[in-house]
Amino acid sequence: MNQVIDGLKQAGVRPRDIVVYNRYRREMYDAGIAQWAPEGVRIAWASEAYTRIQHDMEGYDPDVFMDMALALPGEDITDERVRRSYVTRVLTKQVNKVVNLPTLKHHDASGVTVTLKNMSHGFVNNVERSHATRTLLATGTFIPAVVNLPVFRQKMVLHIVDGVKALYNGGPGARPQFIWEHKTMYFGTDPVALDKIGWKVVDEKRAELGLAPVAFEKADRANRFSNPQVEHIELAGILGLGEFDDKKIEVRRFDLAP
């Protein structure tokens, strides 16, 4: 994070114009993010902490949302807060460009979490409905529907994926037994291409260890869902959010001296 901030400063961005954001305030402080932020740089969040019912609006923009006929079981679908996921005011009102900083990891609902899910579930509320129960799974359409909003298209300009230590199973929680030393960082402006690359890397690691590809894994002690909806990446490509075709994705590798 601090290296990114240093780069922005070198590019002429004033510290007071840099905002370090995490969706949950409590998570930001528990992880030490707020303490690491350099003096003069602002910190921001949208909600106090994770809750299953996510209809709080204090940190969200009532005028910018994704509406989908999808709800947690038992909720009233006629309530617009139930159907909608509102975008954080940080994104809609406070910044004009965003550097997205995801990690490379497995996710038992969406197959992988790289750039797209980091955006779709980090910048809007009411996300639990996308993976509500073992049989109610909709990340495949929920993720691209959120990231297809104009505010994401216009403001998400760079993605830096931390794959130094990556997760190949049991996600989204980083269980130590499923972490491996991938020792790689990914940089790009195309979120779909980066997710396609990340997906392949996770599947390669799983194959090495005798595990099924993420799209075909089954629920077990480490994973809640069967057949995670990794198709969110392909659908995002169809929507024009980036390049999905491997033949059109150029990957340049730079090896750093030890």
Image (tube, rainbow, N blue to C red):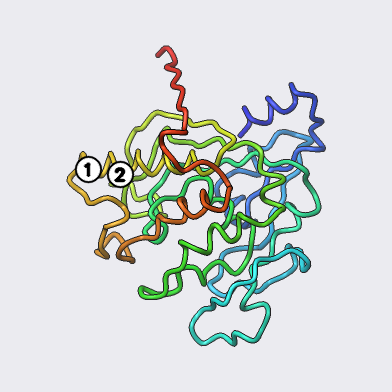
Query: What residue is rendered at 28% in x and 39% in y?
Result: 204
- Residue lying furthest left in this view? 210
Q: Position of residue 5 (x, y in %)?
A: 68, 31
Left or right: 50, with 153 as reference point: left
| Numbered disc total | 2
* Location of mark 1 (residue): 207
Q: Position of residue 75 (x, y in %)?
A: 56, 85
Quadrant hosting residue 61 = bottom right
Q: Position of residue 23 (x, y in %)?
A: 63, 56
Q: Which mark is residue 203?
A: 2
Report the amino acid beneath label 1. Answer: Ala
Left or right: 243, with 86 as reference point: left
Q: Closer to the camera, 216 or 175?
A: 216
Q: Are marks 2 and 1 in contact (CB under 8 Å)?
A: yes
Q: Which mark is residue 175?
A: none
How far apart in space, not on screen, are marks 2 and 1 (Cα)?
Answer: 6 Å
Query: What residue is rendered at 72% in x and 70% in y?
Result: 57
